[in-house]
């Protein structure tokens, strides 16, 4: 949930750290800070509450010494409010050592008591400062930052990625991770560490992911990885698939606007290389084994937030095409309800970041209970794929805006590909049906482009509705998760109360919410699909219209049935009913973004949120 960067190389740490933190700021932006060891071997630290720009302004007004060794941090507060004192880095060994941290040290209180009893003092309320003081004590005892790390991590409980430097060891940064991300960037005469590859991708695209319970020591010309016992660990480098430009705004008003515009490519790139002569073959699942897939008798999809809604959409397709029962569970609920898990249970986790702690812990729980696990993930080298039996990467490119958009449609794409792959393996779909659904998938990028090109009316509608106090969303079948996602977008971007309902559920209570002028978005199923379902949704529209609701219908081009009852109709291109979610969600994403913009809000970094929630 925090962004961390480490650097060793030439006398440019400050530029590298600030550049990396800028790209990581979406992971948390309550406060930011840097620590650098200068050429004279002296440690300097500057940190400020607020966004990274506050730190940058401070450094512009009061330049700090530069150096070849540095660490930087942008925070999403867990222990202690977003203040200067609680900002990272935190110091140990009388200010000669600096530490930054991503995660939560669950046993920090008894450790703090132990240190207080020995006469150590603290300036902040954070768990991180306890690690810093502990590291300082062990550095005094061992004279080695790496050895000090080994002793300290053996005593910590919880989730942590820690980076540290010491002024007595210029040119050295040491890091350790447990249940929290850390990747190495391999340079020439310089090396990098980061929460994810965005921290250093402008300098190098050669990366190494650090595994669970490992310690890494970087110097300008060497990278050493060991386990917590000090045993050397073999690591494998990978090439980052996108460049720095891809994570820049590229002239768009916001990352969110840019990423919505990239949704056609997100789908197309996720399909690429997985469709062959009208059939789906997912190469990453080859190692998993068709025989194993054929033996699966239950699928549980686990995820959080928007990813969970993608899972709910995917559930309809996977179950219908493969005839395997599919359930969707919120990760943080799943492992606490003592679920029945057998060796023929398949758990599919969905995570854009691949670091969501709730989902990571649920995957570990399921695998320990004997389930097979497949990860749908958008971030190469992330933790959740490494904790799974196989990964189906989405190829949406870096998603920087906290509110997920292109990753959402890419996740649905990956789930539909999986459903068709599984149906092929199980022989539960005819060749003709497989070919038909593959053709529908291949047509989606162009159809999304069409929706994007005709989105001006949505922007106008958002401006007109910018003073709305509550907005409802209705959908049925695969439209129901889209109603939930539309509501979430509005909540997290425009801070407006919004709620999604299954259209059929309204009359069982929620219809009491309808009053004159109440805006209600309705995702209308295609009349070319289930005529009965279409008719029922049109009836639902009439029921709420009769009570004064203001209806905005997301409906298929040419659907005349809704015209008499809707105040606004947002047309979407024709698509087979199962494929409507790809198109219906786009106007809802744009609506939420435009309404938030009309309210003068920051659509890329909404209040209280972080891009990757790496604490439970
Ligand atoms: C989506 O707009 C939200 N930012 C949030 O719900 C997000 O989808 C959720 O936290 C899961 O994140 P993940 O996909 O990285 O696991």
Image (cartoon, rainbow, N blue to C red):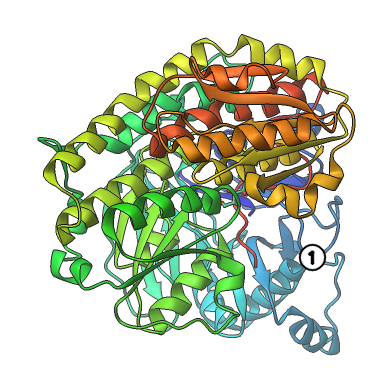
Neighbor class of circle 1 (other Cα within 10 Å; few <14, some 14-19, many 20+) is: some
Quadrant of res 585: top right
- Horizontal side of 145 relative to 468 (left or right) equals left
Quadrant housing the C terminus: bottom right
The residue at 40%/25% (across/down) is 264
Q: Which residue is mark 1?
A: 79
**Is residue 383 placed above or below 547 in the rendered structure?**
below
- Give the image location of residue 490, x and y in percent: 72, 36
The residue at 84%/38% (across/down) is 514
Depth check: give the residue in front, 313 or 87. 313
- Give the image location of residue 101, x and y in percent: 64, 61
Residue extending furthest toward the left: 277
User: In the image, is the residue at mark 1 within 8 Å of ligand 1 by its beta carbon?
Assistant: no
Answer yes or no: is residue 14 visible.
Answer: no
- Horizontal side of 300 relative to 463 (left or right) equals left
Answer yes or no: is residue 486 visible.
Answer: yes
Quadrant housing the N terminus: bottom right
**Is residue 317 placed above or below 583 in the rendered structure?**
below
- Give the image location of residue 165, x and y in percent: 59, 60
Depth check: give the residue in front, 246 or 518. 518
The residue at 56%/46% (across/down) is 481
| Disc 1, SS | loop
- Give the image location of residue 453, x and y in percent: 50, 10
């Amino acid at each position: 949930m925090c962004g961390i960067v480490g650097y060793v190389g030439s006398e440019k740490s400050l530029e590298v750290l600030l550049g990396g933190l800028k790209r990581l700021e979406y992971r948390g932006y309550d406060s930011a800070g840097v620590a650098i060891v200068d050429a004279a071997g002296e440690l300097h630290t500057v940190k400020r509450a607020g966004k990274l720009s506050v730190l940058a302004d401070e450094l512009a007004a009061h330049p700090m010494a530069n150096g070849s060794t540095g660490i930087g941090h942008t925070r999403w507060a867990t222990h202690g409010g977003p203040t200067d004192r609680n900002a990272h880095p935190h110091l140990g060994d009388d200010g000669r050592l600096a530490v930054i941290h991503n995660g939560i040290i669950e046993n920090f209180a008894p450790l703090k008591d132990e240190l207080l009893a020995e006469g150590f003092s603290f300036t902040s309320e954070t768990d991180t400062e306890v690690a810093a003081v502990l590291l300082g004590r062990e550095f005094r005892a061992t004279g080695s930052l790496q050895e000090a790390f080994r002793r300290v991590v053996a005593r910590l409980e919880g989730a942590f990625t820690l980076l540290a430097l010491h002024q007595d060891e210029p040119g050295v940064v040491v890091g350790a991770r447990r249940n929290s991300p850390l990747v190495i960037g391999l340079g020439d005469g310089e090396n990098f560490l980061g929460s994810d590859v965005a921290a250093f991708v402008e300098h190098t695209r050669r990366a190494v992911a650090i595994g669970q319970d490992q310690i890494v020591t970087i110097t300008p010309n060497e990278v050493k990885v060991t386990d917590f016992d000090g045993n050397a660990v073999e690591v494998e480098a990978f090439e980052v698939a996108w460049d720095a430009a891809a994570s820049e705004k590229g002239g768009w008003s916001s990352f969110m606007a840019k990423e919505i515009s990239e949704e056609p490519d997100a789908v197309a790139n996720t399909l690429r290389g997985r469709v062959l002569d009208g059939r789906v073959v997912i190469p990453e699942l080859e190692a998993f084994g068709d025989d194993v897939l054929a033996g699966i008798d239950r699928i549980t999809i686990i995820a959080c937030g928007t990813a969970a809604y993608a899972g709910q959409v995917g559930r309809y397709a996977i179950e219908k095409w493969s005839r395997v029962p599919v359930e969707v569970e919120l990760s943080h609920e799943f492992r606490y309800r003592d679920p029945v898990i057998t060796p023929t249970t398949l758990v599919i986790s969905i995570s854009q970041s691949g670091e969501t702690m709730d989902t990571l812990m649920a995957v570990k729980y399921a695998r320990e209970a004997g389930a097979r696990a497949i990860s749908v993930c958008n971030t190469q080298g992330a933790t959740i794929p490494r904790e799974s039996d196989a990964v189906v990467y989405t190829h949406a490119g870096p998603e920087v805006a906290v509110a997920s958009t292109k990753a959402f449609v890419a996740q649905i794409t990956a789930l539909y590909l999986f459903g068709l792959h599984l149906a092929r393996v199980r022989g539960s779909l005819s060749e003709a049906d497989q070919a038909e659904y593959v053709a529908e998938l291949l047509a989606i990028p162009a159809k999304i482009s069409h929706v994007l090109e005709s989105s001006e009316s949505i922007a106008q509608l958002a401006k007109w509705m910018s003073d709305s106090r509550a907005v409802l969303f209705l959908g049925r079948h695969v439209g129901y998760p889209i109603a939930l996602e539309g509501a979430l977008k509005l909540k997290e971007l425009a801070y407006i109360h919004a709620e999604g309902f299954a259209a059929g559920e309204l009359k069982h209570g929620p219809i009491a919410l309808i009053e004159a002028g109440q805006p209600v978005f309705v995702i209308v199923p295609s009349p070319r699909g289930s005529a009965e379902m279409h008719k029922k949704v049109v009836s639902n529209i009439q029921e709420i219209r009769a009570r004064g609701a203001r209806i905005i219908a997301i409906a298929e081009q040419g659907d005349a049935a809704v015209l008499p009852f809707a105040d606004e109709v947002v047309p979407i291109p024709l698509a087979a009913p199962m494929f409507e979610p790809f198109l219906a969600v786009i106007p809802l994403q744009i609506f939420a973004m435009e309404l938030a913009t009309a309210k003068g809000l920051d659509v890329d970094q909404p209040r209280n949120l972080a891009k990757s929630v790496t604490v439970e």
